[in-house]
Image (cartoon, rainbow, N blue to C red):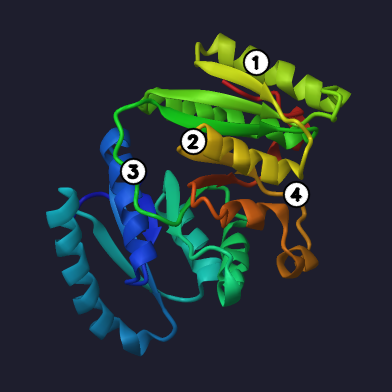
Amino acid sequence: METLNHSVIVPYDFTEVAMNAVAHAANLCKNLNTGLTLLHIIKKDSEKKEMEQQLEAELQKIHEIHNIRPNGLIREGSIFKTINQVAHEIEATLIVMGTHGMKGLQKITGSWALKVIVGSKIPFLVVQDAPKSKDEPLKLVFPVDFKSENKEKLKWVQFMSRYFPSKTLLFSASSKEGALDPRTKANLVFCKTFLEDKKIDYELVLAKNSASFSQETIDFAIEREADIIIIMTTRDIAFHDYVLGAQEQYMIANSAKIPVMVINPRTDLMKYGYGNFG
């Protein structure tokens, strides 16, 4: 069996959105030269034997469709803990997860996605549809506001640009008059300096402040036909945010179905002032 180290993980539940996630992950694996691991979580160990047969059939089908041979893992547990436990155990590079969006009763699923993501040190790429085939460079929308955690996203822009032709679209929050909060301006300067130093192609666009920044970000991503929106979760996110609808939840399950890379703030970088970038 292929090594599982530095694999891309797909939480797999035999649904269409999970297969869409597999398609995205397969594309990533071919560029990143990593393995692909399908993780199916069961509630009790007695289900394992039956699920092994079903999963093996899916692995074969995926190999035939995407010309990549995935590994399969079946673990007893819950999606809220087991996905991240396995990701850390096999030193996963990325977790690609499908979600159903936020319409009707599926709003609950959107909140589940955020609960799964929060606390992971490994980024999630959350997808809804199958990937679009295109020959152009990836367009990465990078929202910038006043939060210092914005800077943590830069290493993942660098990571993506190393393996994929891409352009980063810095999308900055502003007032209706076009003014920038001093903290937002400082973050922008940091981002621009970093991208220029790493010779990463980028463009800066200011929001018009005509709606919430999250909505404007989605609208901008639609307008520019973006491939991925890169966001941070809120540090110390509270329970009521899941119930009432955190902005991250809204972004993750956006109606345009644009994939969203979600990164959690690293508390271990706080003492470095987020200056520890290479």
Q: Quadrant of the N terminus?
A: bottom left
Residue that badge 4 annotates: 235
Tell me the residue at 59%/28% (across/down): 154
Tell me the residue at 75%/49% (across/down): 235
Disc 3 versus disc 2: distance between alpha carbons?
11 Å
Q: Residue 58 is drawn in which quadrant?
A: bottom left
Q: Amino acid at mark 2?
A: Ala
192 vs 119: above or below:
above
Disc 4 versus disc 3: distance between alpha carbons?
32 Å
Residues packed near mark 2 inside 10 Å, few (<14), some (14 to 19) or many (20 plus): some
Q: Nearer the viewer, mark 1 or mark 4?
A: 1
Residue 67 visible, this angle: yes
Residue that badge 1 annotates: 192
> In this image, 151 relative to 13: left or right?
right
215 vs 53: above or below:
above
185 vs 141: above or below:
above
Using the image, tell me which numbered label, if any, was put on residue 132.
Answer: 3
Disc 3 versus disc 1: distance between alpha carbons?
29 Å
Judging depth in this view, the residue of 31 and 173 nearest the camera is 173
Q: Amino acid at mark 3?
A: Lys
Q: Secondary structure at mark 4?
A: loop
1 or 2: tag closer to the N-terminus: 1
2 or 4: tag closer to the N-terminus: 2
Q: Nearer the viewer, mark 1 or mark 2?
A: 2
Residues packed near mark 3 inside 10 Å, few (<14), some (14 to 19) or many (20 plus): few
Task: Report the label total.
Answer: 4
> In this image, 276 relative to 63: left or right?
right
Tell me the residue at 72%/30% (across/down): 207
Q: Nearer the viewer, mark 2 or mark 4?
A: 2
- Image coordinates for residue 165, horizontal then vertical, percent: 37, 23
Residue that badge 2 annotates: 226
